[in-house]
Image: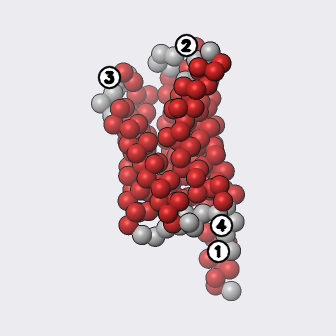
Amino acid sequence: METTVDTMTGTGQHRLMGALTIAGGLCYVIGGVILTTTGGGSNQIANALGVLWALGAICGLIGIGLLGAVGRGVLGRVALAIATLAYVLVALDAILIVAGVFDEEASPLFAISRLGTLVGMVLVGIAAVVARRWPGWRRFSPFAVPLALPVVIAFGVATGIEVFVPVFIGLAWIVIGYAVWSTQTH
């Protein structure tokens, strides 16, 4: 009986984290659409949505950890730690931009935090593939984040439409959130 309660509790936790990740991804898609339709530049609404996206991404990483999708070894723990730290820096950066401490172009955290997210998600993807604990397509979902930039470039070349990167990064996090949310635990 005790095992069933633990599993049900774990299921609720990872499903909540997945749902929050999907919500964060949707916020970033909306922010990216705002930037795309306004031609870019600083936009307080898009910046505020960026804070929600970063918090959602952190929830997704927590969900991946709760599921044990990257295993319980050193590689999985280091990968999650690097990715989580990078998204904490992204959230801090976004909060400081929204607060008006500095603008996006002058942010000392912007480049390093965004590079950290890409490196972190590649490591999380590798750890998920190596661990083989996440079923089917889900184990490859963390690679959606680093693949978003080439997809944006290919989309722009193929269609001639300039779309800002947050649209596709947000879509990547929706995929990851769904992977976390839809994982069945026994």
54 to 41, vertically: above or below: below
91 to 3, vertically: above or below: above
Q: Nearer the viewer, residue 3 or 135?
A: 135
**Is residue 173 shown to the viewer in this render?**
yes
Q: Position of residue 82 (x, y in %)?
A: 38, 52
Q: Which image quadrant: the N terminus?
A: bottom right
Circles 4, 2 touching at the beta carbon (< 8 Å): no
The first of marks 1 and 2 along the sequence is 1
73 to 89, vertically: above or below: below
What is the C-alpha distance between the residues marked 3 and 2? 19 Å
What is the C-alpha distance between the residues marked 1 and 4? 6 Å
What is the C-alpha distance between the residues marked 1 and 2? 47 Å
Crowd tier of the residue under label 1, counting other residues whose Cα lies within 10 Å: few below 14, some 14–19, many 20 or above: few
Q: Where is residue 69 in the image (x, y as percent from the top left)?
A: 55, 63
Kind of residue at disc 4:
Thr
What secondary structure is marked by label 4? helix
Q: Residue 106 carries which label?
A: 3
Q: Residue 85 carries which label?
A: none
What secondary structure is marked by label 3? helix
Kind of residue at disc 1:
Thr
The first of marks 3 and 2 along the sequence is 2
What's the residue at 59%, 20% (across, down)? Answer: 156
The first of marks 3 and 1 along the sequence is 1
What's the residue at 68%, 74% (across, down)? Answer: 186
Residue 111 relative to residue 185: left or right: left
105 to 132, vertically: above or below: above
What is the C-alpha distance between the residues marked 4 and 3? 42 Å
Q: Which mark is residue 7?
A: 1
Kind of residue at disc 3:
Ala
Residue 140 relative to residue 102: left or right: right
Q: Mark 4 points at which residue?
A: 11
The first of marks 4 and 2 along the sequence is 4
